[in-house]
Amino acid sequence: LYACGYSSHEIQTIARDIDWSGIFGPRTDAYGWRSPPRPRVWIKLVGFHSGWRFPSGLLDDSELNFTLMRMFLDSDAACAGEFDLLPIRFRTVATDLATARWVLLTRGSVARAVRATISMPLLFTPMSDGEHLLLDGGMSANMPLDAARIAGADRLLAVDVALPVPKLDEQTSGVVVALQLFDMLNKRGQRDTLTSRDTYVWLKLPGISATGFAATDTIIERSYREARGPIHRFAIAAGLPRAKTPLTRAVPMLPRLAQSIEWRGGVVARGRAARAVMGRLPEGPFLPHELVPALDRLQRSGLFESQWPTLEVRGDSTVLALEVREQPAQELGLAAAVGTDEGARVLAGLALRPVSGPLPALVRVDGVLRQFSWAVNVSGEPYALDRGGRGWFVRGTQRGTRPRVFADGERIGLLTSNRSEAMLGGQVGLLHRQVLQLGAGWGHVTGPGDAWSGALVAFRTEGQGAAHRLIEGDWAPGADGYSRVNAWFDIDIKRGSYVVRPGARAGGASGRAPADALVGLGGPPTLTGLSLDEWLGHRMLAGELRVVREFSSVFSLYLVGQVGTVEGLVSGADLGTGSRAGFGAGGEVATPFGPLRLDWGRTDGGRQRFDLMLGDRF
């Protein structure tokens, strides 16, 4: 970023605003439809013409790729593939997977070069530059001093953020020993050395882990404090003059776009659909970043795993070339979760992407099995809609639900509801990261009372980001029909490593509402100290204030106070219809299988419980 002309203040703002959990963790921007969002998968297989295999990267890198593309789009257009034309000459290294040697990247796309040098093995898909398949540069040159000298530098300022060598003895944890061995093997054979003319700065950053992205402000503050003196002395020793004017980013005005887009990366079967998704492009002369909205729509469609733009001026027009990586034709995923309250649950999902024939271009089939419910869902879409894109959908479901009935904290029975649905609908964007889904079709419900069949209308509007806004409901017209609505609102107020999160919930069901349309409170998300949805009825209103302390991107603790009321009771009659309050505390550790959460809560009536859960709620 600095080589491209960004100031230190701009870099700090960018680092603070990036959603690191969305880049290096599970997706946080998925939009569901009449069911909880899809959980992260524990096991995933992808199918191509050559058969089934494990994916080349465990993490979805689409958000990372788009973030890098957006940051460097202007600079890539300005330097036209020559890193020497940037405000500061830029070089970086990556590791050739075939030889395990470092490769010096001197030209091409800045965004792709940065992406290549952070391609951590197993986590992210390797990058290709046409000649090499590239991995994280730290695998071959953790501090590439030799590469810098080859690039022409004769006096080096080396800034190291490597973790310190741990104290090792007979009692050292096996995990620590394994990490230290990996680090030693990683650096084996590296001959990079410092000379007397070089300056070495080691930012020790005590208390900050390698995944401590939540502490961005603390990292920057400590880095300034530790590095300011050595860097100042280096500048004096090197005789560097103080810059009289700040660096500026070159943002070229490009001639109008050519009529067609060039697709690169092999045979692109979904080029026509992708062009339709991108929508309107700039007309006449334009600035490169004016393409970001169209590229954002393409990224959110999920038609490709990655799309890297190149802008080439040819005569009196600019050609937009997109190098894309196609999505696999089939995906098979398996997810699970287990908790002390509702037991175990498992999800198996199949995604099919036919590249020829009529629409849809994406078909999903999911099966979910829980201790007290099950579901089979089928959907057809023109492309993936779970990131908020505009499009139509056809969705059907068959599910059985058995809500628990409690008295004095003990389960005394189960309600039963079986539902079949088939719906046709659409999704549109309303505001920034706010979508509206509307569907209509037919439904059939059986339960403790009479069966119901007839027309069904459903809606859902959800907004993502610092403020999470969700309103959903369904309406079955007729004398035997019902209506239901649920509303959920949270907002994150961040102050350093602390997050203050006030929230409100409301819901209601009227008419002959089946058991799966009832609303309730209970469990760590809504009223701690109770079992999940233990306090169940026809009307619900609640609020909470949650304070979270994020120690790193993988570990956090929280305190929460909650209050709510439920009327028209079906379960939890001992709790009454007045207001109830609860206080709770807990912690969360991110694991490859989803969060590991420990929650404790106590109600104002003296009821308390501990809950332990591994995996996402679904």
Image (tube, rainbow, N blue to C red):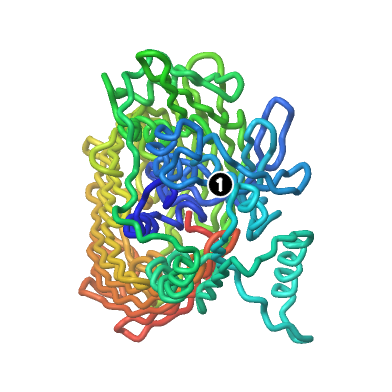
**Along the viewing direction, whichever of 358 and 129 lies nearer the viewer:** 129
Figure check: 466 above or below 233: above
Figure check: 213 above or below 78: below
**Along the viewing direction, whichever of 415 and 300 lies nearer the viewer:** 300
Residue with the most extreme front position: 239
Which amino acid type corresponds to the residue marked 1 in the rendered image? Arg
Left or right: 195 with respect to 31? right
Relative image position of residue 608 (x, y in whole percent) = 41, 82
Instruction: Give the residue drawn at x 33%, y 76%.
Output: 560
Relative image position of residue 10 (x, y in whole percent) = 33, 55
Q: How many marks?
A: 1
Instruction: Give the residue drawn at x 41%, y 66%.
Output: 216
Relative image position of residue 338 (x, y in whole percent) = 57, 63
**Along the viewing direction, whichever of 107 and 477 lies nearer the viewer:** 107
Q: Can the viewer see residue 60 in this picture?
A: no
Left or right: 274 with respect to 180? left
Q: Could you tell me which secondary element the residue under label 1 belongs to?
A: loop
Instruction: Kindly indicate the quadrant of the structure image that contains residue 298.
Output: top left
Q: Can the viewer see residue 103 in this picture?
A: yes
Callout 1 environment at 10 Å: few (<14), some (14 to 19), or many (20+)?
A: some
Figure check: 217 above or below 561: above
Left or right: 12 with respect to 461? right
Left or right: 471 with respect to 94? left
Relative image position of residue 41 (x, y in whole percent) = 58, 50
Find disc 1 in the rendering and name its residue.
Answer: 91
